[in-house]
Amino acid sequence: RFEAPKVMAPHVLMRISLLESALLAFPLAVSCDFVPPKNPALDRLADALKAQRPIWAKSPAQRKEEVRRPIGAKSPAQIEAEEASAAKKQRNSICAFSLLQVVNFLARSAFQIQSLADNCPKARPGKKGFMTEEKACLINAASLVSSMSQIASGLSVAADKCQDSMNIDALCAAPIAALFTPLTQFIAASTVASAACAEEAANLPDDISLGRRLQEKFPYDFREDEEVRYQVVRPWNITKRKRRREIGLCVIDATSTVMALGQLAVGFNAAIRSCPAVRGAPLQEKVSKADCTVDAGFTFFSFSRVVLFIADAVENCAPGDQKDSLCVAAAASLLASSFSVTLNGAAIYLNCQIGEEADAIIEGTSKFIPREKVKHRKESKPHKGKHPNGLGHHLDRRKLMEQLASARSRHRRSGKDDHANFTGFSPSSSRSRFIGELASESRFERAEELWLSLGYNLSDAQAAWLKDDPEGKAVIRRGSQMIRDLQTTRQEPAQDLGPEEAVPISVPEVLIDPEDDAAALSCSERGVAYDLDLAGQAVSLEPGAAACQSRCARTPGCANFSYWPPQRHCRLHGILAEPVRGQPLWISGPPGCQDAEVSPATQRALLRKSACYHPHAVYEPRDALAEPRPAASAEDCQRRCQRVKGCAHFVYSELDGTCSFAGDDAKKLQPVLYNVAGPSHCADRDYFDLGCEAAKFEDRSSLPVGPLAHRWVQVVLLAVICAVAIAALVVRAVMAYSRRGYQRLLNGEPSAD
């Protein structure tokens, strides 16, 4: 007998126990001709073990996972299957409640139409006080609109949840349609509450008929059967002559209560997962707050409707006067309408403006959220959408997170991280570790064997591939020429000038109208996008190109914008971003079409790029004076350098916004892509007083206006301006020379000829 190590998986221990039982029973069966009784449970266990692959027949990675997986933990495949099953069940429940809502309000609308036909013809305007017939007709009309709103909302939700694929248009239509419900219910609920909840309801004037004999001073009379009775939940009207109507409304109220209870459970289940909101990047926090608002608002809305439908059922199902039920129903309807406005407004923002990217933004996995600002990242899952009658599928991955935390704490002592065993990829794994894992599964023991399989013998000093290749030389020659072309020479100040006293403002003199897309398109290019986003500026959702341009004009360091109309994505770019042409539907342009629309800070940054800064360059060695820190822009990094003792050069990375410093002995390395380097101070010049050089400012600063967006137009215009200036000087000289010759002729002097 032997004991298995505690680290073995459960099924391995089961195999060992089964083997022990067989070994102990074998001598007894041989010596005594003993026939053991049949055990169905043991037979099923043996068949199951036979069906499983033995552990020694699995791959090394599978054996490693089998042994190291904590006891009781589920594999990623099992967790994924459970979540898929839970998601399907929740979709089916939401689909069922949505269809029940459609049927419920269809039945209500039938009673409301009949009440309209009975009471509207009796309405007579001009009467004093509370005119029963006229008010009842108004309330029934508003209630019919409310029922149609609920039918449209339920159908929109069912169009999305009753199929496997997501329908974002239906999700957007659901809260828009549901907004008509609170608007109409405010009319009916406030009227009924003012009458049914008042203590003096029994002393109202005789011309007010509040249904079901709220005026208790009148004895019961069959003539009252023809009078109008209304209430807030279902402000349709019925008569006592038709008791079957009351029974039908009682059944509808009962089914409505069941529907509201189910929706309350769905809303509460979603609210405990989406609340509290995520505190991270501005867009992430905003979308998360809207998500929490929808779920929490729908929970309270559903609870109010439960109270409302119960009070409605008491009014219809119980005999006699139930004016207290009318009062409770009126108050519950007003409360439910208030919650409905709140949650539907947030749902419109999520489904109609954010769209499919909402969940990715909340989880921090969206490309619109800067990595350094992501907080409280959740696990990835597909977008579900939010709507007032069936909130999104908030899949419960809490168990998976607990298992991952347990695994990390269990193996941290041994220096092992089992995160990858559960998720398939470990964000914390280094590149060398990932390469090592790949190498452990490779059939090559050394790197030389891998190169040899590709046809390169590293041990052969006379190999043909080591000889010079004409094509390779041509590539090297072109690369060397490119490096020489990218070299820049800038004038640096002779002495340390100290920190800058005046910093240009980042607000333009003339603000751009965010709704004037025509003006923004006049200096923008279609089919062009820029390749590098401005560090620290996430992609935003803007209604048009003008709004995107306005955002760029207000952002320090923004030299260009790119706008994607299909999804309303707005991207900002720094001074090193390059245009990429051939991008359909993209619109890009400068931060302003006129000089006054560009902030002085942006104008100076663009001028310094051409006269002071070294694009795509760094200084080495660096980071000895101070630790690299993030900065808002290249100018911000330069100003920080001025306050650091011994800093002679700065280096700003537009990839991550990191700012670092270098001393006098540092050497410039160029090109190093997407880095801006420069001295601690710039000898700024006025480029507008340099004759034809002033026309080049538009080309340097990338601020074309109207047709000047095309480079060839700029070149031609510059040539024309210079040619006209030269021609004017020539004509002036010829005219002066001719005038002097003409004066000599008049004076009788011989001409110069």
Image (spheres, rainbow, N blue to C red):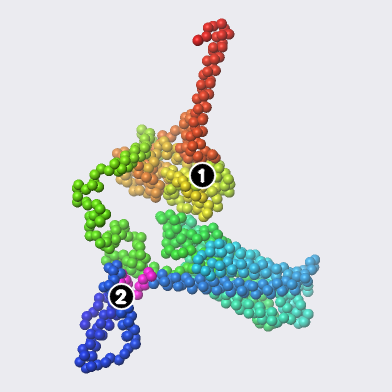
Name the amino acid, label 1.
Glu
Relative depth, front residue between 283 and 50: 50
- Image location (x, y in percent) of residue 495: 36, 34
Label at residue 378 = none
**Splitting the image into 4 quarters, where does residue 131 fall?**
bottom right
Q: Is residue 628 left or right of residue 105?
A: left
- Image location (x, y in percent) of residue 747: 57, 7
Q: CA distance from mark 2 to mark 1?
A: 62 Å
Is 1 in the magenta? Answer: no
- Density class for disc 1 (Cα within 10 Å; few <14, some 14-19, many ≥20) is many
In which quadrant will I find the N terminus?
bottom left
Choose the circle earlier in sequence order: 2 or 1: 2
Visible residue check, residue 23: yes
- Density class for disc 2 (Cα within 10 Å; few <14, some 14-19, many ≥20) is few
Relative depth, front residue between 750 and 475: 475
For numbered disc 1, what is the local secondary structure? strand
Residue at image position (52%, 58%) is 354
Q: Is residue 478 left or right of residue 241?
A: left
Name the amino acid, label 2.
Arg
Relative depth, front residue between 460 and 483: 460
Residue at image position (25%, 82%) is 19
Visible residue check, residue 298: no
**Splitting the image into 4 quarters, where does residue 331 fall?**
bottom right
Disc 2: which residue: 53
**First to last magenta residue range:** 64-77
Disc 1: which residue: 525
**Splitting the image into 4 quarters, where does residue 337 fall?**
bottom right
For numbered disc 2, what is the local secondary structure? loop
154 versus 494 height, above or below: below
Residue at image position (72%, 81%) is 242
